Image: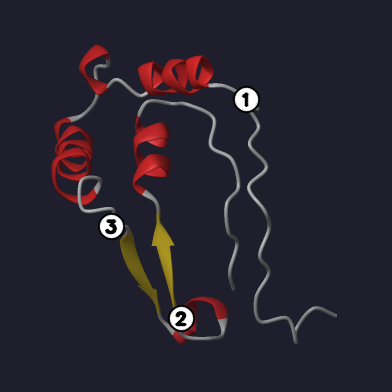
Amino acid sequence: SCSNVIGLVLEEDNPMNYANDDAAESRQDETDLSKLAMPAPLLALCHYIETKLKPANETITIHMPEEMFGTEHDTWLLCEDVLQFASMVEIGSTVITL
């Protein structure tokens, strides 16, 4: 049984295996939100992330109550993950915490 497991941390799997700056720039182009049609609330969230959170190097913190997973804790969403999700780019696993 895994009931005694509190946390599990996995290294980033980097599914796209970017090895150089050109590939990283290509990845940035994939998250260019100006090229995408998306609902207004999602566009507003992405705009907030790009203008407020990314420049300040901040994350989105979400509080998970005990009723959700059995232990009360906080989890974080990285700005890059939200932007990649919004633009439908594959997201690599960074941290899984329970």
Q: Amino acid at mark 1?
A: Ala
Q: Is residue 84 left or right of residue 56?
A: right
> Along the line of sight, which residue is nearer the eye, 18 or 94?
18
Give the position of the C terminus as an image quadrant: bottom right
Q: Which residue is mark 2?
A: 73
> Along the line of sight, which residue is nearer the eye, 76 or 20?
20
Identify the colour scheme used: secondary structure
Q: CA distance from mark 1 to mark 2?
A: 34 Å
Q: Is residue 66 left or right of residue 11?
A: left
Q: Quadrant of residue 86?
A: top left
Earlier along the polypeptide chain: callout 1 or callout 2? Answer: 1
Q: Is residue 15 left or right of residue 83?
A: right
Secondary element at image label 2? strand
Give the position of the N terminus as an image quadrant: bottom right
Q: Which residue is mark 3?
A: 58
Q: Is residue 14 left or right of residue 64?
A: right
- Within 10 Å of disc 2 (Cα), the crowding (few <14, some 14-19, many 20+) is some
